[in-house]
Amino acid sequence: MLVPAATLSDYDIQHKSPLQRRVNTRKRGEIVHTSQPATQNTALRHYAVIPHIFLVADWMSIVAMQWFTIFQPLLEHLMSAIIKNKYLQAPIPKAQYGGRHTVTMLPGAGIGPELMNYVKEVFRYAGVPVDFEVVQIDPKSETNDDLDYAITTIRRNGVAIKGNIETGSLTRGVTSRNVALRNELDLYVNVLKCQTYPGVPSRQKNIDIVIIRQNTEGEYAMLEHESVHGVVESMKVVTQENSERVARFTFEFARKNGRKKYSVFEPGARNTGTSIAGKNIANPIAMLNASVDMLEHLGHRYHAEIIKSAIDKTINEDRIHTPDLGGQATSIDVVQNIIRHLQETTKTTNWAGR
């Protein structure tokens, strides 16, 4: 933390209450200036006033330091947002090596690694021209080295698919991995598609909405401080500039996708699914749908369509559901059925024309 130089040089502020703090007496005679003769009475009078002056100055220093501590993160956040504003929309990365893309894969914690394995297996059977650069982030790391490397690979490849990443360290300076990724890469909106499947019993039918929410401000700004011991304050900062670009993105999304209604929501909670990790019961559909969205973003629309079709057939026609959907199927059962549909589709595919 930066501290004004005058505070460090003039005052001893460690391990003392405000009323106990007093100025180091060295060189204090230099502070008092008078044009009167230096008689004994004037000297006594001046030195009688000095402790009160120091006490007021000490309190002013304390207040200044507290305000500086509170607003330093805010200033850094705003400056970072201004610098990143020139990179609002990253272009789709150019395909390399015969039309293939390299994508950063961050498996995360909990069920993330097994779900990523299902994605790689489905992509292999679908013939998707994507290579994954897998980056592991240690949730217990006491440094940000893993996070910095992950950000570097995402910037190099231009695209990433990720699970939820835990932050197990309590060390000061080790930030939330998920929030840091959003802020460092300026991922200012989150697009969440909500659709009902005809083959899944649900209270509401024919749901087809898209939720778009801000992703880097509010609580995600990470502007938190401990004002006094045991009291932590969090500043929820939302800027006009970011609000406008979220709204602009929402309108543009609605226009391009034929949506007549739209909503902007605040951030919600997420879970790594640690309690069901390794039990072969995690539903792989959400991660596979995310991979389909990624393929559409990369321009691999054919591969996105055949995977999406295989998912729909598995859920709606074959009704192979994991326990969270009221079924008895395992994660592998769902994935194998999707692969079976892909094999039926791709055995007659003319790959030379793709």
Image (cartoon, grey):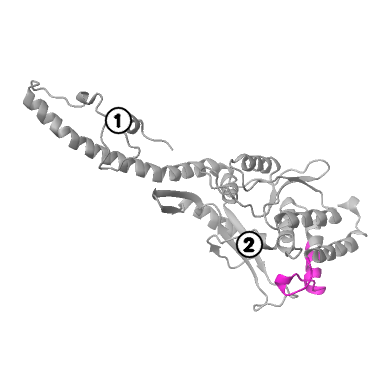
In front of the other: 323 or 279:
279
The magenta stretch spans which residues? 308-330
| Residue 51 coordinates in the image, percent (x, y) | 19, 35
Tell me if residue 273 can be seen.
Answer: no
Q: Residue at x 65, y 64 (%)?
A: 193
Mark found first going from the N terminus, 1 or 2: 1
Rendered view: 200 above or below 50: below
Image position, residue 214 (x, y; %):
54, 56
Q: Is 310 in the magenta?
A: yes
Q: Evaluate whether residue 17 shows in this view.
A: yes
Q: Using the image, tell me which numbered label, if any, was put on residue 10.
A: 1
In the displayed structure, does residue 319 sit left or right of residue 176?
right
How packed mark 1 is, by other alpha carbons closer than 10 Å (few <14, some 14-19, many 20 or more), is some
Residue depicted at 30% across the width and 33% down the height? 11
Occupied quadrant, residue 312: bottom right
Q: Are dots 1 and 2 in contact, CB under 8 Å?
A: no
User: Is residue 57 part of the magenta span, yes or no?
Assistant: no
* Direction from residue 22 to residue 300 in the image, left or right: right
Which residue has dot 2 on it?
192
Check disc 1 and give the amino acid type: Asp
Left or right side of 8 for 32: left
Image quarter of residue 272: bottom right
Outermost residue on the right side: it is 348
In three-dimensional space, the C-alpha distance between marks 1 and 2, rounded to whole angstroms, equals 55 Å
Residue 273 appears at what percent x and percent y?
A: 66, 61
19 or 34, nearer to the observer: 19
Observer-side mark, 1 or 2, equals 1
* Left or right: 293 in relation to 64: right
Asked if 148 appears above or below 5 in the picture, the reply is below
Horizontal and vertical percent for residue 69? 40, 43
The three-letter amino acid code for the residue at tag 2 is Leu
